[in-house]
Image (spheres, rainbow, N blue to C red):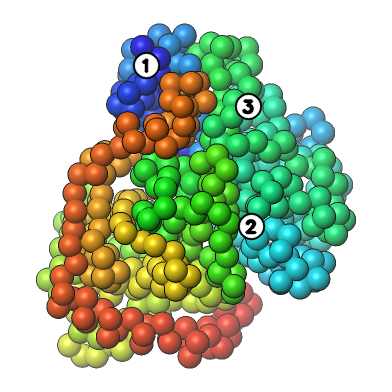
């Protein structure tokens, strides 16, 4: 039997799993690492931590599975998107990597937009507007703020592609993750030498770009020894974590849309052709499916808002063990009626991407009265997170994109009450999978495709992915949410200026 590894270099940790050729998960392992926040709105990680976690989890999985090293035929890589690993000419990491949720690059986004001849010109070149989390503004930030480091720069890689470099010795990325750099001509699926030139950068800074199921190399002798595998083991392109998660959820054809409530929130829809929201609120990126695209809306602090609420505010939930803290908090929320009796929460704790693209947006509770309790507040945090996802859904449906099925995933969707809330807020039936393994599973499938176990990603998904559970919308709750959503949607515009002033105060 042949086996395939999927490695997902996430923000809170790395998850590795091993599947057999039929898609059954044989073993899995996780390893966590810290995220550094040197200033408000700045987020960084040490690429060395990602590598250590990769080695540790691969070794753990192989040991648990008792599979022989030469039976592991290929590896798929997934990871947090948009980050920047800055390398010098000797492959030394120059400084900590800047992450997808780092907000320091507003000035560089303006610089890129101006260099491209305005927002429209930029969207024409790379299909997307400049957003603070993307990789291109990070490179310009280095040039503008750390000239000495910029002068040493020989290559810039995305997080998972730095792992690939350490595995195979090659500088390679693939189209789905490359879309989130802002350097990729998303329609042509190759680097936009036009934009790179306009920014005064050297195209040699960037790696080669391939399709997600393409083989990018085999393990070096050193990497094979470290991981306990063989030098015949292939490494396929893989995907950014959103596209990888979509593959793992079977979102590889039109009509199925997936939501993910992890630290970030993602609403992801497959598209056969590149499609654009005229206002650039959704990302238009290449899918991990060969020759296909996707659109997605991203909320920066989605499940992260509930995590903040439970860990930083409700920390005193007396006697509740850490592992049960979400269950305890959401049980209180479940006792409150849909709509939290008119208490709303805006989940913009670290700025927001879709639909506002505003690094200075801030969180708030609005509409509080003397009858509201702790349970109301927890429920309204969850409802605010779900309304933020509905913002993306409304843009997607307003573009005429068919949505026949909503597939829920991520840590938040494991909770049945939150699945019901999603069905009610979206006014649609929500499905979940029998075994939801997320991005690591998606890229393990891509590895199987790259090794020839399946003809295509679509075939691999059809053979291995089964829907397990359906949650139907409750009419009365849908009515309440339909009444509250427009009020929620208007709040950002009304508070924007004050949020900006407060963000300035917080940074001073
Ligand atoms: N039992 C639960 N009930 C509700 N939400 C949960 C539960 N467990 C986890 N979550 C939510 O899921 C989030 C973590 O999701 P996960 O997909 O593991 O995130 P990531 O991979 O982005 O770190 C938490 O921040 C929390 O908001
Ligand atoms: O920025 C995006 C997608 O555009 C985020 O989805 C990151 O890719 C999140 O990574 P994790 O929180 O799942 O590690």
Say which residue appears at 19% left-offset and 53% top-offset: 470
Report the front residue among 266 and 33: 266
Image coordinates of residue 482 in percent, x first then y, are 28, 81
Q: Does mark 3's beta carbon lie closer than 8 Å to ligand 2?
A: no
- In the rendered image, the vertical position of residue 234 relative to residue 468, given as above or below: above
Say which residue appears at 71% left-offset and 32% top-offset: 171
Say which residue appears at 31% left-offset and 32% top-offset: 464
Callouts 3 and 2 close, C-beta under 8 Å: no
Secondary structure under the numbered disc 3 in the rendered image: strand
Question: How much space separates mark 1 and mark 2, taking CA atoms?
Answer: 37 Å
Image coordinates of residue 253 in percent, x first then y, are 42, 48
Quarter of the figure that contains the C terminus: bottom right
Residue that mark 1 sits on? 63
Q: Is residue 9 visible?
A: no
Q: Dot 3: few (<14), some (14–19), or many (≥20) neighbours within 10 Å?
A: many
Residue 216: mark in rendering: 3
Secondary structure under the numbered disc 1 in the rendered image: helix
Judge depth for marks 3 and 2 and give the one in front. Answer: 3
Residue 160: mark in rendering: none
Callouts 1 and 2 close, C-beta under 8 Å: no
């Amino acid at each position: 039997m042949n086996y395939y590894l999927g490695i997902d270099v996430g923000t809170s940790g790395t998850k590795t799993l091993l599947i057999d050729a039929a898609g059954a998960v044989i073993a899995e392992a996780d390893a966590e690492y810290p995220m550094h926040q040197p200033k408000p709105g700045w987020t960084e990680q040490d690429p060395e931590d990602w590598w250590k976690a990769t080695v540790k989890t691969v070794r753990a999985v192989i040991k648990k599975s008792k599979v022989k090293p030469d039976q592991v035929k290929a590896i798929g890589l997934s990871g947090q998107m948009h980050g920047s690993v800055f390398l010098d000419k000797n492959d030394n990491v120059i400084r900590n990597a800047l992450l997808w949720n780092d907000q320091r690059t507003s000035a560089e986004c303006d610089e890129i937009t101006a260099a491209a001849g305005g927002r429209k010109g930029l969207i024409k070149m790379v299909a997307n507007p400049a957003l603070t989390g993307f990789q291109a503004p990070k490179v310009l930030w280095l040039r503008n703020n750390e000239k000495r480091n910029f002068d040493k720069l020989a290559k810039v890689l995305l997080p998972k592609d730095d792992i690939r470099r350490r595995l195979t010795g090659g500088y390679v990325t693939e189209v789905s993750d490359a879309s989130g750099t802002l350097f990729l001509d998303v329609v042509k699926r190759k680097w936009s030498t036009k934009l790179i030139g306009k920014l005064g950068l050297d195209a040699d800074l960037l790696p080669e770009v391939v399709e997600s199921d393409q083989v990018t190399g085999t393990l070096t002798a050193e990497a094979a020894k470290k991981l306990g595998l063989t030098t015949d083991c292939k490494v396929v392109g893989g995907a950014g974590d959103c596209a990888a998660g979509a593959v793992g959820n079977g979102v590889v054809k039109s009509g199925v849309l997936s939501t993910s409530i992890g630290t970030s929130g993602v609403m992801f829809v497959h598209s056969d052709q590149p499609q654009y929201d005229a206002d650039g609120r959704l990302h238009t990126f290449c899918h991990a499916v060969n020759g296909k695209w996707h659109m997605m809306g991203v909320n920066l602090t989605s499940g992260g808002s509930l995590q903040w609420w439970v860990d930083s505010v409700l920390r005193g939930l007396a006697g509740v063990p850490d592992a049960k803290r979400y269950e305890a908090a959401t049980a209180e929320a479940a006792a409150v009626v849909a709509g939290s009796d008119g208490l709303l929460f805006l989940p913009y704790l670290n700025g927001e991407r879709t639909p506002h693209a505003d690094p200075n947006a801030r969180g708030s509770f609005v509409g509080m009265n003397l009858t509201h309790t702790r349970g109301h507040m927890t429920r309204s945090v969850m409802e605010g997170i779900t309304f933020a996802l509905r913002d993306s859904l409304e843009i997607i449906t307003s573009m005429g994109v068919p949505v026949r099925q909503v597939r829920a995933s991520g840590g938040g969707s494991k909770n049945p009450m939150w699945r019901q809330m999603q069905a009610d807020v979206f006014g649609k039936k929500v499905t979940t999978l029998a075994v939801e393994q997320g991005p690591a599973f998606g890229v393990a499938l891509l590895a199987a495709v790259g090794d020839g176990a399946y003809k295509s990603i679509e075939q691999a998904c059809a053979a291995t992915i089964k829907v397990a559970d359906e949650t139907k919308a409750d009419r009365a709750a849908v009515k309440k949410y339909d009444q509250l959503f427009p009020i929620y949607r208007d709040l950002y515009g009304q508070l924007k200026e004050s949020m900006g002033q407060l963000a300035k105060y917080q940074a001073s």
